[in-house]
Amino acid sequence: MFLASLLPGSNRAGPVPILRRLAPGVYAAVGDTGRGSEGRPNAGFVVTDSGVVVIDAMASPRQAEQLVQAIRSVTPRPIKWLILTHHHPDHHFGAIVFRRLGAKVIAHPDRRVLASEGGEDALMANWVRVVGLDAMRGFEFADVPDRPVTGTDTLRLGGRSLVITHPGAAHSAGDLLIWLPRERVLFAGDVLIEDGVTMVVDGSSGSLLRTLATIDGLSPRRVVPGHGAIPARPAALVARTREYITGLRAAMRSAVEQGTPKGRAMASLPPADETRPVSLNSRRRRNAVRVYLEEERAYMGLDSVP
Ligand SMILES: [Zn+2]
C-alpha cells in the first residue's frame, strides 16, 4: 500500500496468486486474503483475442513472475499492456517483468508518493527490507507510462474495452480506476481495500469521497480492491469505506471547531503499531492526522476541504 511503511516480511513472495474468474476472460489474481494492507497486493488480467492486458504488477520481479505463471495457466497469448492503478511500490515494482515480455505501460504520469520523498536509493533500500533481496533480482523502475492517462482513456484490444479514469487524488496522486463496462467489473486499486480503511495520506479524504460516488455511479457487479478479499457485494465495501471516512471527517471537524489540539483529538484512537505502518491501527491514526490537518486548513479558510 505504502512503502516506508510495510512490515519487514510482509509482501514476501508467496505462492502463485490464486485466480478468480470474474467474467469470461476477466481474472483477479488474489494476493493474500485476510492480511489486508499488510499482505501481498491483488492484481488482475483480461484475456482478449489479440493479447492480454494486465492490471498491476505486484511488489517485486519475483511476484510478477508468479503472476505471469498464473496468466500462463489460462492463456499463451502475448501480454500487450500493463495498466497501473497507482505508483505505490507494492503495485508496480514487478513492472519490469512485463516490459521485458513486450508490454507497454499505461499509468498516470504523476509518480510522486510520500514513500519516495527520501529519494530512489532510500526507497529501494527500504523495499529490499520488505520483500527480500532475492525477490528484487532484475529490478528496474518501469512505471513511467508509455501511454499516460490524466483524464479518461479507453483501451480497445481484441474486442474488449477497458475504460481507464483518473478519479482525482484519492489514495495517491496517480490513482487510476479500470472499468470494464460490458462485464461491469472494476479494478479499484487501493481506493478500496478489504477492511474499508483506505489510506488517504498520499491523497485526500475529499477526493476519496468523490471517487466512492463515482464507483457507486458505475454500479459494478464485481470490484477488485487493492488488497484482500473480493467483496460479495461491491456496494457494501464502498458504503463501509464512506462511513469510515465520513465519520473521521466529522470527528476531526468538531475537534478543530472546539479548539482541541491535534494530539488530544487523536487520544480516542488506539496507538499506531510501531513496526507495522499499514496495520489497521496505524492506518486509522495516520489518516486521522491527515484529516485533522485537512479540516484545520478548511476551518482557517486556507482552502476548502480538498
Ligand atoms: Zn497504495
Image: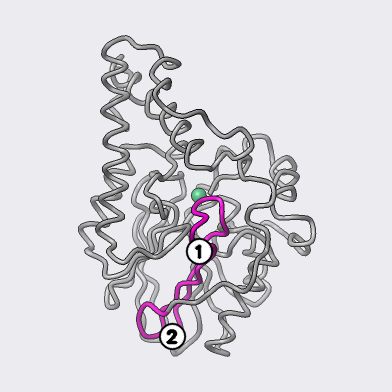
Determine which residue is flagged by label 2.
48
* C-alpha gap between disc 1 and disc 2: 20 Å
Determine which residue is flagged by label 1.
42
Identify residue type, mark 1: Asn
- In depth, the one of 88 and 1 nearer the eye is 1
Any atom of ligand 1 within 8 Å of the CB at mark 1? no
User: What residue is drawn where x is 63% and y is 80%?
Assistant: 69
Mark 2 residue crowding within 10 angstroms, few (<14) / some (14–19) / many (20+) = many
Q: From the viewer's perspective, is residue 122 above or below residue 30? A: above
Q: Secondary structure at mark 2?
A: strand
User: What residue is drawn where x is 28% and y is 43%?
Assistant: 209
Identify residue type, mark 2: Thr
- Range of the magenta residues? 21-47
Q: Quadrant of residue 186?
A: bottom left
Residue at the top extreme, as displayed: 259
**In the figure, is residue 265 to the left or right of 130?**
left
User: What residue is drawn where x is 32% and y is 9%?
Assistant: 259
Any atom of ligand 1 within 8 Å of the CB at mark 2? no
Q: Quadrant of the C terminus?
A: top left
